[in-house]
Amino acid sequence: MQLDDRKLKILQAIIRNYLETGEPVGSRTISKYTDLNLSSATIRNEMADLEELGYILQPHTSAGRIPSDKGYRLYVDHMMEDKVREVEELREMVLEKEEKVDQMLKQVAKVLAVNTNYATMISAPQYRGNKLKFIQLSAVDEHQILAVIVVEGNVIKNHMIYVEEALNQETLLKLNILLNTHLNGLSLEEISLGMIAAMKQQAGIHSDIIGDVIDAVADAIRADEDLEIYTSGTTNIFKYPELSDKQRAEELITTFEEKQLLTELVNDTLSEESKQGIQIYIGDETPIQTMKDCSVVTATYELGSGMKGTIGIIGPKRMDYDRVVGTLKTIKEQLDRMYNDKLIEKKPDA
């Protein structure tokens, strides 16, 4: 028999309350716990039906009810279906959004290179100051658990955890509730050692799993190490005699191709509030050694929900600073406007 919405909500309330308190749950507690606006008498009747159907048990004659294995199974199946569906919807949305952003940023780099006659770069947006949205643990096989971690901006990270013994669904459910109850809505800085110790204590023999998940959460919240940077106009360097010396040109081209130094520049720009906005580096002021004969102008853009990236224009010291700064301001403003949690189907004008 499939439960109607009212019975299902009452069963879910009983299970959640029992998992939190470990005490049998009565009708008065459920009347405060649900949004059904039902009387205690009506809830008692529904609980009697749930008991008859085998979803809950009454351990003592005068006590409240506790979930049966059948009740746990229904709860776990519903919870997993909802979480899997939510994660899949998020994943599809993020993939679609990322594809559009990639195309847009590549176009921005090309437009800047054409309009300025300098080399250009733009980094994909990174998430700064993220908070955890939720965690989902699910069994892959007897020795592997998949931890799906979703942080602000709907960034999804998957992490495999090895376990010596298989965990049943009820254990996974309790770990999911433990993790989400303590960690949802927190930033990395707000997750204290005391909190982790308390969670490990509650997890008992599964404390190692809590430790693995915390490590995975930390990795998910931190900025991506594999930062995507799009470049264009590298050959424009050869248009300027002071940069077209073979050794200098090769060093600059290598910098653009390997991108490691560009990544360091981006991370340096985004990590300090004072360096966000528009910055001009001339000669020795430039943080990249291979660009000491250049000027580098950077601007930080924001695509909403804490997503920030860096635009850079690299040229000779005699670059047209007024034009470069004006162009960067225009592009930055267009990018800043383009995201209000949703990508607007529009590319920036040159």
Image: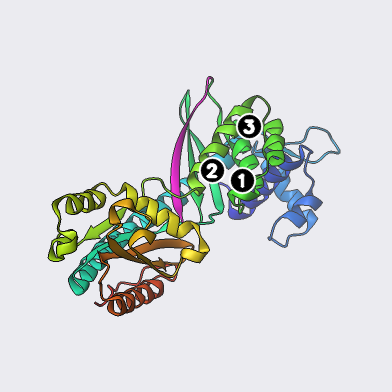
* Residue 166 part of the magenta segment: no
Left or right, 328 with reference to 34: left
Start-end of magenta stretch: 154-164
Mark found first going from the N terminus, 3 or 2: 3
Q: Quadrant of residue 115?
A: bottom left
Task: Give percent across and percent down for residue 84.
Answer: 46, 46
For image coordinates 13% across by 61% down, the residue present is 238
For image coordinates 42% across by 56% down, the residue present is 126
Image mark for residue 180:
1
Q: Is residue 303 visible?
A: yes
For image coordinates 42% across by 54% down, the residue present is 267
User: What is the spatial separation of the Cα atoms under label 1 and label 2, in whole angstroms?
Assistant: 15 Å
Circles 1 and 2, Cβ within 8 Å, touching? The answer is: no
Q: Quadrant of residue 6?
A: bottom right
Q: Please tell me whether mark 3 or mark 2 is closer to you in this view.
A: 2
Image mark for residue 261:
none
Residue type (three-letter) at the residue carrying disc 1: Asn
Image mark for residue 218:
2
Residue type (three-letter) at the residue carrying disc 2: Ala
Q: Quadrant of the C terminus?
A: bottom left
* Residue 162 part of the magenta segment: yes
Mark found first going from the N terminus, 1 or 3: 3
Q: Is residue 42 visible?
A: no
Q: Please tell me whether mark 1 or mark 2 is closer to you in this view.
A: 2
Left or right, 300 with reference to 182: left
User: What is the spatial separation of the Cα atoms under label 3 and label 2, in whole angstroms?
Assistant: 34 Å
Q: Secondary structure at mark 1?
A: helix
- Crowding at mark 3 (Cα within 10 Å: few <14, some 14-19, many 20+): some
Q: Nearer the viewer, residue 157 or 175?
A: 157
Image mark for residue 69:
3
Mark found first going from the N terminus, 1 or 2: 1
Residue type (three-letter) at the residue carrying disc 3: Asp
